[in-house]
Image (cartoon, helix red, strand yellow):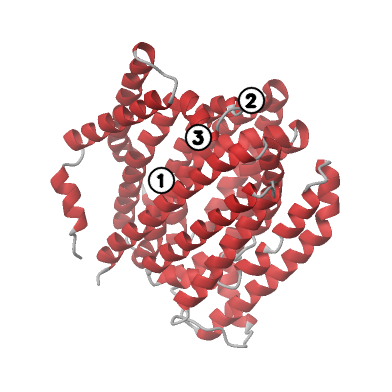
Amino acid sequence: MSNKRKAVDGGKWITLSTVVSIVVQFAQVALLARLLDPADFGVVAVSNLIIGFFVTFANLGFANSIIYKQESDRTVLSTLYWLNMLVGVVIFLIIQLGTPAIVAFYKEPKLTRVLQLSSFYFVIVYVGQLYMFLLEKELRFKSVATVDIGGTVVGAIATATLAYMGFAEMSLIIGQLVSQTVKSTLQVWLGRSLFWPQFRFAFSKIREHLQFGLFNLADGILGYVQSNADNFFIGSILGVKMLGYYQLAYQLAVFPIIRLNPIILQVAYPILAKMQGDDVGLKRAYLKILDALSFTNLPLLAGLFITAESVVPLVYGPGWDESARLVQIFVFVGLFSCLGHPLFTLAFTKGKPNLLFYLNVATLLVKIPLVYIMGNLYGVTGIAASFVLATLFNLVANFWVVQYLVGDFLRDFFRNFIQPLAFSAIMVAIIALYKQFIGNEGLFHTLAQVALGGSIYGGLTLAFKMSLAEIKALRTVRG
């Protein structure tokens, strides 16, 4: 099977996995928002901040280096596997020992048991993580999708059941651990034919992987800090309840983007890694990725922006009005983020992860002062707005890096981008007229607005972008 055919098939499986994940996630959050208090979400958000920081050490860049170098040496892979396991145990111990200091800083006693239980994630995740890298390297996206769907569904069921039984914030933590346990088990089972660890540790043989991962790791740490500076500020200054409102708004507006983009990027990286020396081909592929992301993300974000006031109460129930206005701000974070994501694929393909590190340093220097100043002046709304400005800066710098890697592309990008932007603007205008003259509140009007927006955008796409015949042709493409 050709790489092109593998990419198409991989896209189908990752799409299925992503759709299932998004549907399950929204259903889970919608249910939990009715069972838990915003403060419960805030406590878990603080825990996720701590866990998220240590996740940046998760593979020391091995995922990207294994794919980039097309690594298959069993001794090297065994060494990486045991090194990962060792890192997991060390992180587990650090969190266990550091919990009292974290609890004292946030002045939230519930964090003690939440953090101590959350730390077991690092004992579980490394058991199967290397197998996932190898499955992606070999373009076995059916297996990748199976892992994601299995873990997501089982974890969501466990979380909802425990929340209903009164486990409060602990239901979220236990559900996450159940999900990761299922994923690790499936990763080992489905990837066992590709690799089985030997009791070898040859540190000298993995130096190139460590060198490749150095900037990747540093970039991950800086990226984490600049992505979560707002959450740190809110949690420590404004309290865990306000952080709960902020987190659920972020999840509704940005989570779909985070989950939708890997449909293309997760499939694209292993393919692009095989064409590292073809700059013309890489630029063409990068523009196609941007075009695909624009056409899939823009209508979702635009539709959420215009319907946020009615969608938030329907999804989360009463008591979450504070999140609605934040959703409309986060829509722009989602837009700028989705346009910036393809650089990661391009940088790793070109063997330039250091550029991502420098980009995050610059963004961090912009975001931290913005969060502090606007947070003090305008509270949680100011912090959300500072996130938008920092993400816009990141996108501008991001495009400059792309110019450096593959040459001029902006003219072609804007020529492609104008279509989904115009289609989305027309969609928003018509939905606004519907809200003004027909109705806005309630399930019927919300569903009608969603259906109207989807029909308008879909109709314009079929008329001016891609015909039904072309869409059907994608399903039968052969390499």
The mark nearer the N terminus, 1 or 2, is 2
The mark nearer the N terminus, 2 or 3, is 3
| CA gap, disc 1 and disc 2 | 32 Å
Q: Position of residue 439 (x, y in %)?
A: 38, 16
Q: Nearer the viewer, residue 10 or 447?
A: 447
* Mark 3 surroundings: few (<14), some (14-19) or many (≥20) residues within 10 A: some
Q: Nearer the viewer, residue 475 or 109?
A: 109
Q: Farthest front residue? A: 165
| CA gap, disc 2 and disc 3 | 24 Å
Q: Nearer the viewer, residue 462 or 145?
A: 145
Q: Position of residue 97 (x, y in %)?
A: 83, 61
- The circle on residue 403 is 1
| CA gap, disc 3 and disc 1 | 41 Å
Disc 1 residue type?
A: Gln
Which quadrant is the C terminus positioned in? bottom left
Disc 3 residue type?
A: Val
Identify residue for label 2. 382
Identify residue for label 3. 315
Q: Nearer the viewer, mark 1 or mark 2?
A: 2
**Residue at image coords 64%, 30%:** 383
